[in-house]
Amino acid sequence: MRITALAMLISTAASAATDAREDDLERRDAMRRAVEAGDVLPLSQILPRLRGRIAGDVTGIDIERQRGRWRYEFRVIGRDGRMREVYIDARSGEIERVEEK
């Protein structure tokens, strides 16, 4: 009985991991298509703009699509040691807002 329960648990965990991987792959494919279509600027163009405006070390990057628009979110530790979240429009490269955390 314990072996069956353990096998079911492992199977469920493996299935969840596979689903998460598939979601991640779908998200990457969507991003690649958006960059190729010109809807999103690649990081190679966004990062220099960010570094030119916000001094510090980038510690995290995320990108989300909200209300039909792609937006980069950067976590930056400034030279003053403060954490900031910087939101950048992924199409234009314009900084939308900066939040101190």
Image (spheres, rainbow, N blue to C red):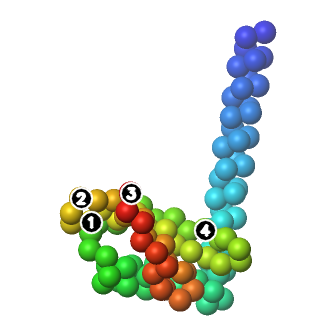
Question: In this view of the protein, can residue 29 be seen by the observer?
Answer: no
- SS assignment at label 3: loop
The residue positioned 38% from the left and 57% from the top of the image is 101
* Label 2 neighbour load within 10 Å: few <14, some 14-19, many 20+: few
Q: Considering only vertical position in the picture, is 6 above or below 2?
A: below
The residue identified by callout 4 is: 64
The residue positioned 65% from the left and 53% from the top of the image is 21
The residue identified by callout 1 is: 78
Query: Mark 3 is on which residue type?
Result: Lys
The mark that comes first in sequence, 1 or 3, is 1
* Label 3 neighbour load within 10 Å: few <14, some 14-19, many 20+: few
The residue positioned 37% from the left and 79% from the top of the image is 50
- Give the Cα separation between the discs numbered 2 and 3: 11 Å
The reply to whether dot 3 and dot 4 touch (C-beta < 8 Å) is no
The residue identified by callout 2 is: 81
- SS assignment at label 1: loop
Quadrant of the rendered structure where residue 64 is?
bottom right
The reply to whether dot 2 and dot 3 touch (C-beta < 8 Å) is no
Q: Considering only vertical position in the picture, is 99 above or below 8?
A: below
The residue identified by callout 3 is: 101
Q: Position of residue 10 (x, y in %)?
A: 69, 29
The reply to whether dot 1 and dot 3 touch (C-beta < 8 Å) is no
2 or 3: mark nearer the eye: 3
The mark that comes first in sequence, 2 or 3, is 2
Q: For the N terminus, give its image quadrant.
A: top right
